[in-house]
């Protein structure tokens, strides 16, 4: 990658929305010494998904740039932002999280694409950035099956569910919550749409709703 572009990307993360991030440092110690996902697979996944889903950027008359940073094994974050280009940035620490595998990584990238292209409700009106729950819903309803099929067309439904479970564990470990489960849905009902971070169980419920083609869960989404 061009050195100037690399510097711009690293600098840009300072003001980016951290979509998958640590909460209160609860995930410290959960990154492994050696990567669970190899550098080649990590970078290939992010790169090929950027190519596959570039048509989404075409509808916005913009360029989609995906970046798989392989520097700090403890920096387990993924980001999305709309700057001079639409950007999805995934960092090496995600490849060192024991909860995640290749399919789960694809779901993380789908979520970041959702921030850029899932539409309303929006977290950031100025940059047209979708809310967390909306990005989750897009990730499984419109993205994950196609993303998984890029690499292997077998067992797409089962793999999509397992990816949702893996990311649910990742989120729960970050927050210090119990791992979400299919049989323990979040039954809370919000009065106003939560544009920030729903609970890990609520987010897992949203992943499952997207996979099943169901409505967005009321634990974060309120009808107008």
Image (tube, grey):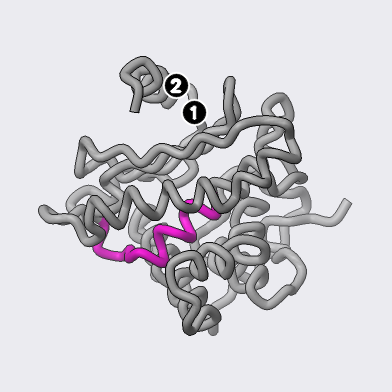
Disc number placed over residue 16 in the picture, else none = 1
How many neighbours does mark 1 have within 10 angstroms: few (below 14), some (14-19), or many (20 or more)?
A: some
Residue 119, image x and y in percent? 74, 45
Query: In what quadrant of the picture does the N terminus appear?
Result: top left
Circle 2 sits on which residue? 12
| Magenta portion: prevailing SS class | helix
Q: Residue at x 25, y 59 (%)?
A: 37
Comparing 138 with 133, the one in front is 138
- Circles 1 and 2: CB atoms closer than 8 Å: yes
Establish if 65 lies above or below 133. Answer: above
Q: Nearer the viewer, mark 1 or mark 2?
A: 2
Comparing 102 with 120, the one in front is 102
Looking at the rendering, which quadrant does residue 4 occupy? top left
Measured in 3D between alpha carbons, the distance from the residue under mark 1 to the one under mark 2, in whole angstroms, is: 6 Å
Q: Secondary structure at mark 1?
A: loop
Q: Residue at x 85, y 56 (%)?
A: 223
Q: Secondary structure at mark 2?
A: helix
Q: Is residue 170 left or right of residue 106?
A: left
Q: Is residue 150 left or right of residue 131?
A: left
Comparing 183 with 3, the one in front is 3
Residue 70, image x and y in percent? 25, 40
Q: Which residues are magenta?
A: 97-111
């Amino acid at each position: 990658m061009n050195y100037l572009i690399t510097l711009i990307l690293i600098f840009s993360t300072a003001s980016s929305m951290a979509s998958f991030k640590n909460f209160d440092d609860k995930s410290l110690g959960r990154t492994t010494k050696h990567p669970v996902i190899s550098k080649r697979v990590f970078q290939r996944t992010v790169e090929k998904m950027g190519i596959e889903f570039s048509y989404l950027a075409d509808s916005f008359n913009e360029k989609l740039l995906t970046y798989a940073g392989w520097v700090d094994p403890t920096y387990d974050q993924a980001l999305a932002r709309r700057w001079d280009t639409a950007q999805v940035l995934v960092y090496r620490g995600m490849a060192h999280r024991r909860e995640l595998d290749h399919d789960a990584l694809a779901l993380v990238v789908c979520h970041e694409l959702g921030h850029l292209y899932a539409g309303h409700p929006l977290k950031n009106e100025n940059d047209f950035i979708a809310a967390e729950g909306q990005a989750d819903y897009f990730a499984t309803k419109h993205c994950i099956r196609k993303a998984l099929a890029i690499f292997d067309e077998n067992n797409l439904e089962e793999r999509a569910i397992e990816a949702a479970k893996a990311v649910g564990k990742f989120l729960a470990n970050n927050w210090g919550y119990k791992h979400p489960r299919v049989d323990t849905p979040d039954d809370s009902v919000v009065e106003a749409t939560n544009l920030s971070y729903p609970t890990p169980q609520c987010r897992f419920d949203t992943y499952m709703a997207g996979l099943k083609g169901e409505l967005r869960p009321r634990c974060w989404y309120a009808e107008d």
